[in-house]
Every structure is written in structure tokens, then in C-alpha cells.
Image (cartoon, helix red, strand yellow):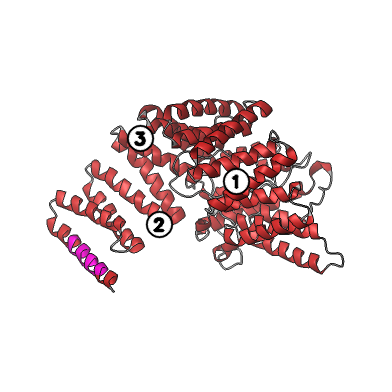
Amino acid sequence: AYGPVHLRAGVPMCMPRPAPDSPLGPAPAGSGAGAVVDELPLAPAHRRCCNDGLQCGGDPLWPEFFRNFSRLGFLSSNELTLPSPDSSTEEGPERCDDALPLRPDVARRDGSSRALLYAESCFEKLEPSLRGGDSGPRPEPAAPRSVRLLKAQHSLGKAEASLRDEMCRSQDAPHFDQSGAVLHLHRLADLLSAQGRLSEAEPALKQALAEAKQVFGTLHPGTLDIMFGLTCLLEARGDLPAAEELCRCLVEARGTTLGQDHLDTIRSMSQLARILEARMKLDEAEKLHKGVLECKEKQLGPDHLETLASVNDVAIYMESRGRLAGAERLTRHLLESLTRVLGSQHPDTLKCTNNLAFLLERQEKCKEAETLYLHAAEHLELLFGAFHDETLCSWYHLACVYEAQGKIRDAEMPYRKVLDGCAATLGFEHPDTLGSLYNLAAAVESQGRFDEAESLYRRELAGCRLVHGPWHEHTHGSEGNLIRFLEARGKKHEADKIRDVRKQAQIMHRRIVLL
């Protein structure tokens, strides 16, 4: 029911983050997959990441393992050249909707499709060793093996179809297995969630929960696991009142059946604390966060990853309440522990580095924040690629810290990286891309390169008019920025033209409102 520990990010993200997948089970003993990885044409950082996952006992069929292959599409061209797919084939860019890219809105990009095709070719080389390795045939899981393999390949649409076929065959079988039907519904909801289809996953998971209560009983561990999954889904959909109500029931049920000190009960309490925090029920959330941390330290030890995740939760909570000094102290302790336990280049360690840098930035300790952001950005780019959310977040905040110190020339490079990443992953018409255009324009203007700055300001205004409409506040702000810039350059006639367009838009808006 529980995946690997992933720390929450305290740093505001430039873009939304994908939901992590859950692991699919333990790795087969004696698997030869590590040797096959060494033979693949991977960039050094990705080969290291894949091998580390295998050496740590991670399942090679775990989706996170194969996400490393899909990230190859975002490596710089001097590291690796991807094969160009034939667009006339079924697997070309036109059919990339069957695959799961890092972000749903990246699926339209040719680069993402090429990366996924390359991941599939890597999988074909890995698959023989994954089937059995040196330890003989791998036991068949409860679900059809094709479902597991297709999910690992990120072909979740095909995996869903395979699972639905299996569900139909099960219903037509002479002896219908109700418990198997519940598990199928649970897996279907998981596949739908992994594709971002949360509105479809919710009724499937609710049906699975209702049937599990009838088949297994209300307090059965399987029923409670489904309840936990539904709580997470409701939270992800923003239905926090329903998520809170269900999570309270889950905490009570696990406390009754397992005891208040059982780890499953404590994990449910941690989930409830995060939901309460999101609902601004802060006093109760703080009490739960601290209680969870105390229990985990007692049962798991101070350096266990789940304990460290709770330290992270408390630190983020304290930051949200404005207790920056206390949050900084906890985050420093957390960073030291993660560096010791996971290493300085592990994604969670780098995420914690970002969190500490953000706390320092908020306290105007810009010099140390600059060092931390730069370290995190460089290593995240090596690990995940230049266009990953965490990478872009680090570059963006590094640019902000540079600006706060008056290092405008230094800020230009990270601003350009953020603009390139947003444009490549989101498109030029996305609000994040338009904001990045403005940031770069302001940095270029501050260096006296007025022609380039004017071009960037005009591009941003054109995008705002297209995306938001002529009377939106963002469009008005963009018009005001360009008017100010043009008047400062002595181009009053051009500034007046923009004013006239804005006045006409305001008049038209009033007429529409009156109608």
C-alpha cells in the first residue's frame, strides 16, 4: 500500500508536478538486469541512477526505473542522440497518447515521443533478464504479466485495455471470484490515476471500496488499503473535506484493529495531518505532525527515511506558519541526515537542498541560498535533465537570488534556462512561459540591451492577449510594462498606440458586461 518515501517540496514550483507511481514489488533475486543496463547507450548520470536503483533492491519493473529511460529525451544533444522515429508508423508522434510522458501536457511534443520510443527499445534489451535472470523463472503475479510489463513501459493505455479484457473474462468465468474482482477494480483505478484520469479513477476506487467492504469486511487490511488510496485520490483532486472525513475513518479503523502505535496507523495520521494543513486546521495539524514524528523516531530510529519524511513535514508546516528559524534548523538537520543516508546527489537530498535554500532566501540570507540553489540546479539537471520541474524550479529561484543581490548579469543565464524549459514542455502560450519571458526581458533591460528587451516585452504582450484576452489583469500589466519601457526610450507614439488598444478593449468589455 505504500511506495518509497518521497519528500514534499517546500519550494514553490514553477510548474505542477506529476504524481509518483507506486512500486510493483521486490526485485527478483540474482537478476541480471544490472549487467544489461551497463550495455545500454545511457548517459553516465542515467546509467548511475538505473544501477543504483537495482543495487538498492528496487524492482526493475518499478515505473520510476523506466522513467529514467524516458528522461533520456531531455538530455542535451551532446550527451546522447536519440533515434528519430518514423512518423508514419503507429508508434510515431501521432500515437504518443498511448504512452505516459513525465507530464501529460508534454505528450504532444515530438521530443517526448522520441524519448518514449527509445525507452521501449531499452526495455526490449532489459526484458529477458527481467523475466528470470539467474534465479529461474519469475513467479507470475496475480495480474496478467502483460499488464505489469506494459505498465513498466509506460504504455498505460494498452495496460488498461489488457486489464479490462481480463476483468471481462473473469466475469464470464463459471466460478466468479468476487475478491479477484475487487483487486481488478483497485488496479484499474491505479492505472487510470497514473494516466492523470482522476475523474475516472475515483468512481472505480469508490466501487472497489464498497465491494471490498462486502467481500472482506470493513476492517480488513485490503479494505483499509483501498480506503487509503481513495483518500490520496480525493486529496489530489482537491476534495479536501471528503478526504479528511475518509482519512479520519481510516485512522480510527487502523487504530482499532492494529493499535495506535502501529506504523500503518501512524502513516494514516501523517496523511490526515497533511490534509488538515491544506484545510488550514493548523493547530490540529501541528499536533498530529509532531506526534507522528515522535512515534516514528521511537519505532524506526532518527535516520529512517519515513522518520526523515516526517521531519520534512514538520519543517514545511513551520515554514507555512512563518517560523522560519525553526524550519531552517530542522531542514539543516534533515539535509545532513539525507546526505549521510542517501548521498549528496540523491533526488530527495537535492530537493531538501532546495527547501533549505528557499528558507534562507526568505530570510534574505542570499549568499548561502545562492550556493545551495546552484548546487541543486546543476545536479538535478544531470540527474533528471534540463526540462524537469525540479531543475527549472532551482534555476528560477537561483535567478531570483541573483537579482536580490544585484547580480543581474548572472541572473540572465538561469532565466534563459527556465524560459527554454517552459517553452519546450508547456509551449510558448502557457502562463509560466509568459512569466519567464517577462523575467528575462527585465533582466536584459537592466543590462542596457534595449532592442532585445523590447522584442521580449512585445512577445510577452502578444502571448497574454492570446491566452488571457485583451481585458485580463495580466494583459493590462503586460501593456503597462511595455508602455513604461517605450516611454523611457522616448517612443511615446508607440506607447500611445498600446494605450489606445487598451482603452478600446476596456470599452468593449463594458459593453459585453452590460449585455
Residues in magenta? 499-510
Judging by the rendered image, the residue that carries numbered circle 3 is: 401
Q: Quadrant of residue 136?
A: top right
Judging depth in this view, the residue of 464 and 199 nearest the camera is 199
Q: Residue at x 20, y 61 (%)?
A: 498
Task: List the residue tagged with mark 1.
Answer: 68
Question: Where is the C terminus found, in terms of image quarters?
Answer: bottom left
Residue 161's disc is none
Question: Badge 3, how many Cα within 10 Å: few under 14, some, many 20+?
Answer: many
- Mark with earlier residue (1, 2): 1
Mark 2 / mark 3, whichever is N-terminal: 3
Helix, strand or loop at label 3? It is helix
Q: Residue at x 22, y 51 (%)?
A: 451
Helix, strand or loop status at disc 2: loop
Q: Nearer the viewer, residue 448 or 199?
A: 199
Look at the image and tell me whether residue 329 can be seen: yes
**Amino acid type of disc 2?**
His
Residue 233 point in image, percent of width and height: 59, 52
Residue pointed to by mark 2: 430
| Alpha-carbon span between mark 1 and mark 3 | 30 Å
In terms of sequence position, does the residue under pointer 1 or pointer 3 come before the other?
1
